[in-house]
Image: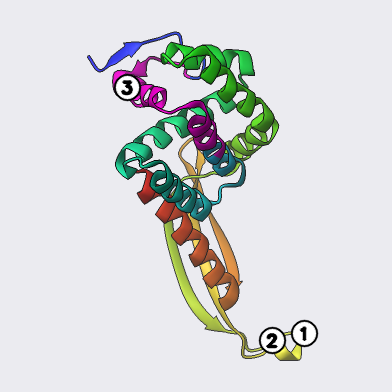
Amino acid sequence: SSTMATGFRFSDGSVEAEFIEDMKTLRALDESQLTELVELCLRFLSAADASALIEGAQEYAERHGINTGVLKTTMRALLLFFKGAARKHLTHVLVKEDLQRFNLEEEKAAAVATLWHSHLLVLSRNIADQTLSVNKLLDMDWRFGVSSSSSELQQVGRTFLELRLQVEKGEGQSESKVMELSLSQFYALLQEMEKAKASMEFLS
C-alpha cells in the first residue's frame, strides 16, 4: 500500500509514502538553503503572489544548482505541509516534531519551525479566509455590452463585460452571481487568472 504513516499532526489521516519521500528531499539542503526555500513558500502562502513564487523558485534553482523538477516536487510537498499545519493552527513545537518525523535533523527542523511561527498569524487568517470564501464554480457565462444611459454623462457608450457565475452553495444548492466589469477590470481579472494558472502549472 502507498499509505504508510499515521500520527502526523498536520494531517488528519495517514500520510502517503510518496509525500514522505518528497519531504525527505529537504535533508539534502543545508540550513541556509532550507530556510531560504521555506521563506519562499511561506511568503507565497501569505501573499498568494504566483509570479513571485515562480521567479523566486527559478532563481533559487539556478543559484543553488538544483534540478527544477526536483525543486517543484519538494516545494509542492512543503506547501501542502504548511497548509495542513495552518488549518490545524499547529504551534512551532508541533511543526518541529512533524518535520523530525520526516527525518529532518533537529537543528534544521527548529529553524523551519521558527520561520513558521513568524508567519503563523497571517497564514492562519489567509487559510481561514480561503476556506470560507471558495465556492466550487459550476458554470460561467459572459457577454459584452455598451451602456446607453447613466447618471454620469461620460459613462454613456462605455463598454462593459457582464460575468455570470453559477457557484455551489453546499447541500446540493447553487446560486447565480452576476458581476459587471469595466474592460480594465476584466483585463486585470484575466491577468490574475493567468498568474493562478501559471502557479498551478508550475507546481503540477
Q: Is residue 112 above or below residue 49?
A: above
Q: Which residue is mark 3?
A: 21
Could you tell me which residue is drawn at 53 percent across and 31 percent down? 32
- Residue 12: image location, x then y, percent: 47, 16
Q: Which residues are magenta?
A: 11-39
Q: Secondary structure at mark 2?
A: helix
Q: Which residue is mark 2?
A: 155
Residue furthest to the left: 1
In the rendered structure, does residue 80 fall within the stretch colored magenta? no
Q: Main secondary structure of the magenta part?
A: helix
- Quadrant of the frame with the N terminus: top left
Secondary structure category for the residue under label 1:
loop
Q: Which of pointers 2 and 1 indicates the residue nearer the eye?
A: 2
In-front residue for pair 34/48: 34
What's the residue type where badge 1 is placed?
A: Ser
> Which quarter of the figure is the C terminus placed in?
top left
132 lies above or below 97: below
**Which label is found at residue 151?**
1
Q: Which mark is residue 83?
A: none
Mark 1 or 3, which is nearer the eye? 3
